[in-house]
Every structure is written in structure tokens, then in C-alpha cells.
Image (cartoon, grey):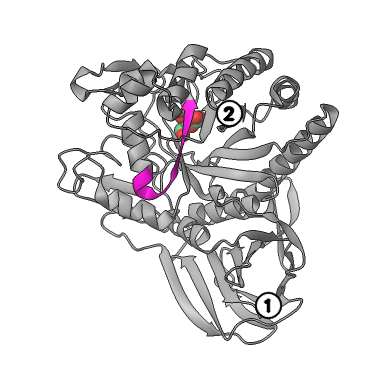
Amino acid sequence: MNHINLDLKRPLGQISHNLFGGFAEHLGRCIYGGLYEPGSPLADSEGIRLDVLEALKRLNMPVIRYPGGNFVSGYRWLDGVGPREERPARADLAWGAVESNHFGTDEFVRFCRKLNAEPYLAVNCGDGDLREARDWVEYCNGTSDTALVKMRRRNGAEEPHQVKYWGIGNEVDGPWQIGFKTPQEYARALTEYGKLMKWVDPSIQLIASAVSVWEKDLVERAQLMLEQAGNLIDYLGLHWYVGNPSHNFAEYMATSELIEARLCAYEGLIRALRLDNRIKRPIWIAVDEWNVWYRTHPGYGQPLNNLEEFYNLEDALMTAIQMNAFIRHAHSVKMANIAQIVNVIAPIFTRPEGLFLQTIFYPFELYSRHCGEVALDVQWEGDTFSADQYSGVRVLDVAATFSLGRKQAAVFVVNRSPDKALETTFTLNEGRFGDTLELHVVNGHDLTSSNSFDQPNMVTTSVQAVMGGTKSFTCALEPHSVTVLVGQVH
Ligand code: AHR
């Protein structure tokens, strides 16, 4: 028997809805042929695919990062504004492509506003410079009559774009990056970029490019960043991609332990460095690229491709496991951006004539829709498994939230058993569940079930109303499933 105990008096922290953010890069068919396809019968007058917009609205993303990724380290934002016919095409060295620049800052901000999402722009800290970065902030957010602000107005945006989130560089710790930086080099650059960008607009929030290589330098990088720019930066950006290259389901599912270890370590590191440097202001974690990515990963130095990964059911479980970790660490993780949003390692897959929703779409939709504002310190016990170097890993992976306004609890559970339904009791420490509870379940026939244009509904969400009204509720959680229990608490 498995037990999940909820105590509404044990909050872990406020949840930022920015945990359910996205990321769009100029890469493959994410922008062109993905969210932007002028001339398509499915697009609006600005070229935005309406079917993509509708699907994205279901994901309820509050923030979207742009324009890269590796792409940004060779990007000139000025190339992507102004009359389209005058925009230069440029070689994109990060992805071996030609960038037309037909979609740029103004188009992206308008796209975000259609989704009710905040734009998050990353500046070029690769082959770009300080001047470009501060100019971009001024172009977007300036209100004085400067040349850049006038240019924005001429380009159709009378009012400032009010871009709140700004990243400084991308994966600067990776040798694959244009303008890779040592810890010392990046800490210096970060300080100067951050200083100037905040001089232009002190209200912006800055995200540093902290870790994408988890084997080397990460402590030294954090130390130098906080020593030098601790009073400027607001978030430290972490990236990771996970996968199942050895086709070992148990090992794949135990990736939860690695994610937990990384978040705990990084939280501790920030705490220690804030103490050491007497930094009173908070510095949050932004996991501003995360996802499953291994089938189409080119590997450093390998031929590039469009990263069009087709996801299966086990990847949907992994997506939920990652979001559970973000909820459990909601006191320190204040933003997370699934990479990416369309076609490129993404929950939505398009062709000119339509789209289908990948398996990972469904858990993301459920979490983003039902997550409350307070993370609960949920306690659970039950069956365990061993894999890789980990033993005693609980088969269920659990997170829980509460919404004060709605008086609603949501419990997010991944059953990692490949073949067993697990009888599970959900118990409230105090109070009772409302009369009716909703059970939302993401599942499919087997672990390799996958959606496609021909079979779009092999993995989807089903919903069931069940009787509550008591302090405890018991049900059998389906094998290889994600279940979200939603109900009021009285
Ligand atoms: O999301 C794909 C790529 O993964 C991004 O461009 C880069 O930041 C990361 O390595």
C-alpha cells in the first residue's frame, strides 16, 4: 500500500507560475514553419499559426524565452527589426542555417502578448557586445525620445514593450557556444552587461547563464558570479536535458534523483554564497532550458539536425517528474522553461496542414492548469525500486500544491511502475476533501506509445469525477501513468 499525506500547515513556499514557461529559438522549424508561417491558411494576418496559438494557450505559459539558445550567441537583434524587405539574411553558425530575420523582436513580443505571456529576451554575450545589449533594452523598454525609441515607434510599437526578463548569454560554460567563457571571463562580462542594462531600465530582472555543464567549474562559476554581480542578478539560469539512451526504463525514471541532487546542491550553493557575500536580496533559480532530448541530440562536433524529437509515454512521465521537482523546490526555483515550444524538442508538432500534440504536452497542460500557489511539503511512502547507483527510490514520485483562493488541493503523482497499478491512499492531516474529486490521468497502452499525425491520441488525458467527502481517499494508480488529483479541502 502507498500513502500520500497532505498537511496544509506545512507549506514549502510560494509557487511562481513562471515554472510553466517556454522557450522558442531560431532553430529548425520552431519559428519558421512552426509558430510563424505567413501565407498559410492557418495563420493570422501577422503570420502567426492560429492552431499553434490555440494549442499553446492550453499550456498556459506565463513567460517565453527567446531568441536562443545557441543561436543568440551569434545574433544581431538589429537585423530583426524594421521593414522586412530591408532585413539582412545572415549565416547562423550555431545551427548551420541561414537566418532570414523575417521574425524578430517586435513580432516575438506581439506573439507573446497574444498568449498573455511575458517575453524573456536573452542577449548575445557570445560575439555580441555591451552596446548591443544595452541598446536592445532601450529599444524595447525606453520611453525618452531617443533614436532607438523612435525606431521602435516607427516599427509600429508606440508603447514600450516592457520586457521584464533579460538573460545575459546562453550556455557560456559550454565549448560549443560561440564565445564560450571561463568562469572569470563570464563573471566580468555579466557584471558589466548587468550594470548597463539595469542603468537603462532598473526595473528589469536579470538571469545569468550559470550551468549547462554539470561536471566542471559550477562552484567556481557561482562563486565568481555572486561575488561580482550578486547585487545585479536576480536568477541563476540552469539547463539540463535528460533521456533514456540505454533503453533502461528504471534507470530513466531514477533520473529524478539526479535532478533532486542538482537542485539541492545549487540551492545550498546560493545560500552559502549569499551568506558569504552578505547579499540580502534573494537570488532565484531559473531552469530556463529543460526537457527530454537524446534521440536527436547531435553531440558536440556531430552533424546538426532539426531536433525534431518524437516523444513517447515514458517521456511524458519524465516531464511530470521534472515538474514535480520544480514544485518541491518552489521556494528557490522561480522560473522554468520547457525547451522548446514547437517542433524542436517540443510538445507541439506541426506540418503545413495542421499539428498534433506530443505525449509531453499532456502532463504540462495538467500541471500548468491545476498547480496552486503554495507548494506543500508532502510526505509519502510505499513501494521502492533500485536503478543505477540509486536504491530505495519510491515508485511514486509526488508533489502537491494548495490554492488558497480556490481552497483547492492538487496532488501530482507519477506511478513509475511499468506494470503494476498501485493502491494509494491520499490522506489529509486536517479537514476533509470536497464531495467530488477529479482524477486526471495521462496514460497510454505501453511505455513506447507515441502520438503522430496518423495516431494523434495514443497518449492523452482522461478525466474522471470520483466521490470525496472524507479525510482519506483511496484509488489504484494505473501503471506508467501521471495522475493529478484535484479537489477542494474543507
Ligand atoms: O534547445 C536546444 C539547445 O540546447 C539550445 O540552443 C542550447 O542552449 C542547448 O544546448
Q: Disc 1 and disc 2: Cα gap in Å?
A: 50 Å
Give the quadrant of residue 421: bottom right
Tell me where residue 273 appears, x and y as whole percent.
80, 30
Residue visible at 41% across and 37% down in the picture: 24
Q: Quadrant of the N terminus?
A: bottom right
Q: Which mark is residue 425?
A: 1
Q: Mark 1 or mark 2: which is in front?
A: 2
Specify the amino acid type for callout 2.
Pro
Label whose residue precedes the other's in the sequence (1 or 2): 2
Q: Quadrant of the C terminus?
A: bottom right
Q: Work out whether residue 401 or residue 177 is closer to the camera in this orientation and state it.
A: 401
Residue visible at 60% across and 65% down in the picture: 413
Q: Work out whether residue 339 or residue 446 is closer to the camera in this orientation and state it.
A: 339
Horizontally, residue 55 falls left or right of residue 299, namely: left
Question: Is 421 covered by the magenta stretch?
Answer: no
Tell me if residue 127 can be seen. Answer: no
Figure check: 100 above or below 436: above
Tell me where residue 92 appears, x and y as whole percent.
36, 19
Figure check: 137 above or below 374: above
Residue extent of the magenta highlight: 113-122
Tell me if residue 307 can be seen. Answer: yes
Q: Which mark is residue 202?
A: 2
Q: Secondary structure at mark 1?
A: strand
**Count of all numbered marks drawn on residues in the image:** 2
Residue positioned most to the right? 276
Specify the amino acid type for callout 1.
Thr
Horizontally, residue 476 falls left or right of residue 42, namely: right
Horizontally, residue 375 falls left or right of residue 314, namely: right
